[in-house]
Amino acid sequence: MKKIINAIVRILICIAVIILIPVILLAIPIKHVEMQIDTTEREKQELIKDEITQIYVHSHPEAPGWIVYGKDGVMFNGGNKVDHIFIVGNFPNKINYDLINTNTFVLNGKYIGKKKRKGVIAGCFYVESWGVLGKLKRESGCGDSFSKSSLTIYDQISADPILVYDVGEFEDVDDYETSK
């Protein structure tokens, strides 16, 4: 009887290990993205061409793909018109949608002016480095067991394409076109 119980315990341990190892592997952090930045609320600040700056953006489902909600420690308040922008440069072109829909992204880089792509005119921001404002939030039920400061192997495996472009895809826009 003791041998049967020991065999059952060993089988259960093996099953538990087989189930737990993939879950543990998927939760391994691979890129730290959390950025703790003290922000205040103020009126909207315009983006200045060729100025090195930090902006705070949310995903937008249609081209150009992103909306600016803040800049250099300031989150824009009130009913100000928001800026829609294209993102180019050092930002992944695939990301886990659980993250894209729930987080504010911090982009360090340079505003390179208005650009046109497939008839859409919007500002364009060249990203040098990026992160997430505060702790990483996740939509799915695994949020409590995965890192709140880093992307994980699961995030990389479940990444889907997002609206990020190559700078060569754009046409320059003159002042006349942007005032229309």
Image (cartoon, grey):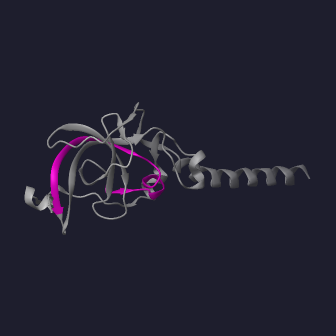
Magenta-highlighted residues: 93-116
Q: Residue at 14% x, 58% y: name it.
A: 179
User: Where is residue 124 shown, x and y percent of the image?
Assistant: 21, 52
The answer to whether residue 24 is above or below residue 38 is below
Residue 21 located left or right of residue 99 = right
Is residue 69 or residue 30 the one in the foreground? 69
User: Residue visible at 63% across and 50% down?
Assistant: 20
Q: Is residue 126 left or right of residue 18?
A: left
Q: Nearer the viewer, residue 13 or 115?
A: 115
Q: Position of residue 18 (x, y in %)?
A: 63, 54
Displayed quadrant of residue 64: bottom left
The count of marks equals 0
Magenta segment includes 174: no
Left or right: 14 as drawn, with respect to 176? right
- Is residue 101 highlighted in magenta? yes
What is the residue that sits farthest to the front in this orientation? Answer: 79
**Up-down relation of residue 77 to residue 101 (above or below):** above
Judge by depth and name the residue closer to the eye, 1 or 160. Answer: 160
